[in-house]
Image: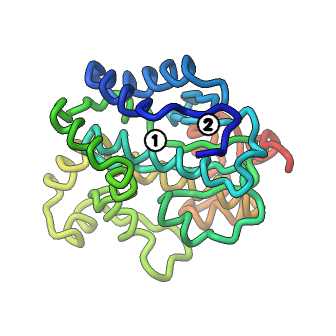
Amino acid sequence: MGFTNQPCKYGIFKLFCELSTHCATLGDLLEKMISFYGLITESIKIGLYKDENNIVQLQFNFTHPELDPDYFLAQYLLVIWHRFPSWYIAETIRLKGVSLMQTGVNNVDELKIMFPGNLLFEQSYNSIFFDARYLDKPLIRSKKEVEEFLANHPAKIMTIPGDKVSLESKIEREITGENFVRLYFPKADILAEKLNMNTLMLYRNLKNEGTSYQKIKDDMRRELAIKKLVIEKLSVEEVSEIVGFAEPRSFTRAFKHWTGLTPRNYCKDQPKK
């Protein structure tokens, strides 16, 4: 589309989709995608990384980022490689966060719709982050479905929802509510009742989604804590209360369990802008 120094020939994505029908899991698909595009272009460098917290980063960097001054291609690629894999596994990949190199942001509301999750700007790379458990998800689309998908590409990709009403999403909305001030997690039986189900069904449905109530609590606390510490620069004491801990020491122990670092050391390790 004129945003790189090297043109991409028409039909490249179609060829990749044909090759993708031989992949078994989402992890296979992404590794194949990285190898494939690494062979056909030097303009875009793609990487897939997993950290110690089992969070995956799918990263896109350009050899000549100045050719994409309005960050159109960067956003386009992140949308495609969130929505297309989600379509392939028939489950929306819930983003943990999105990193964008762009500065001077004037379309934040639009970006929040495009990328459900924490948005970070003025970063050194363009990435989407998600739980590593998705890598083991099977690709369930048939060869015929892939062909039908390609017939409506790229409009088909752009209209795939970026988020869906999963049980995990419902729980997060129930906990944060409209006037969210601090995290409060009700007991499982009370939560189940609010969601119009029994406790056994709550546990079973969460297991089918590959998660648990405890994991949701840990994830919400960790993500909110990092946002409050790193972006909003709040104190450990303030963040401890916001994420629902009775005292800062308990929060510090939990944070170290989540990230391997104390809150203060974690903040020190973040790159300076």
Distance CA(mark 2)–CA(mark 1): 10 Å
Question: Which residue corresponds to the image point at 53% horizontal and 44% vertical from the top-left?
Answer: 77
Name the residue at 43% across, 53% down: 217
Q: Amino acid at mark 1?
A: Trp
> Marks 2 and 1: CB-CB under 8 Å?
yes
Q: How many numbered marks appear?
A: 2
Residue assigned mark 2? 60
Q: Is residue 230 visible?
A: no
Measuring from the top left, give residue 270's x and y in whole percent.
Answer: 78, 43
Of residues 239 and 154, the one drawn nearer to the viewer in this rendering = 154
Residue 66 position (above or below residue 37): below
Instruction: Spot the residue most to the right.
Output: 272
Nearest the camera: 113 or 169?
Answer: 113
Q: Position of residue 56 (x, y in %)?
A: 51, 34
**Within 10 Å of the Cα at label 1, are there few (<14), some (14-19), or many (20+) other Cα atoms?**
some
User: Does residue 5 appear left or right of residue 90 in this picture?
Assistant: right
Taking the image as shown, residue 93 lies to the left or right of residue 126, namely: left
In the image, residue 21 sits, relative to residue 271, either above or below, namely: above
Q: According to the image, label 1 marks what residue?
A: 81
